[in-house]
Amino acid sequence: MDSSNDEALDIIVTNVVATFRTRCHLNLRTIALEGTNVIYKPEVGKVLMKLRKPMITASIWSSGKIICTGATSEDEAKLGARRLARCLQKLGFKVRFSAFKVVNVLAVCSMPFAVHLIDFTKNNRPIASYEPELHPAATYRIKNLKATIQVFSTGSLTVTGPNVQNVATAVEQVYPLLFECQKPLCK
């Protein structure tokens, strides 16, 4: 960060996707008939179950694999996954909570300045790409962090990565590059 501009950037995590296994076969029909807040999708072969606290939606397959989306932190995702496993236990399944893993984190961040996307893309050509006919944001990929940043001309960023630490590191890495390409203030 620039020493003259020491304001902290707020990185807001909007979605955490996590997976876990139950280590048992799940009868989707039983879950659909006896479970609460459930949507049965037989054509896809899964059940959607929603929890209110924490606010998550889970995709449940008969193999015992479950994907949880909608949490706003890694801890909240784990708590939601454990609560979901407990709900399935109460329905009579011999569920054992295992192989929990956070697979994706989506966060948003706003720069205190607007960005000139064409200059940003030219300066970072192999890593950054900008196709205004297809999408209004420039895409910046950081391979070693497995993170992708969508940079909008307003200075808004959408960051995806495998965990919260990588997302924060990605924003720190791209900030100086964005600072070089900021638009002049209009008065």
Image (tube, rainbow, N blue to C red):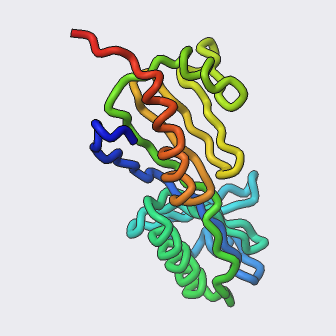
Q: Could you tell me which residue is drawn at 64 percent across and 63 percent down?
A: 67
- Vertical relation: 140 (above or below) 161: above
Q: Could you tell me which residue is drawn at 72 percent across and 28 percent down?
A: 126
Horizontal side, residue 13 vs residue 98: left or right: left
Horizontal side, residue 4 vs residue 180: left or right: left
Q: Could you tell me which residue is drawn at 28 percent across and 43 percent down?
A: 6
Examine the image and state in which quarter residue 132 appears: top right
> Farthest residue in the top direction?
187
| Picture quarter with the C terminus | top left
- Vertical relation: 135 (above or below) 37: above
Q: Position of residue 105 (x, y in %)?
A: 55, 54
Q: Position of residue 148 (x, y in %)?
A: 61, 41
Examine the image and state in which quarter residue 138 appears: top right
Q: Could you tell me which residue is drawn at 55 percent across and 64 percent down?
A: 49
> Farthest residue in the front direction?
3
Horizontal side, residue 118 vs residue 53: left or right: right
Looking at the image, which is closer to me, 40 or 99? 99
Looking at the image, which is closer to me, 75 or 118? 118
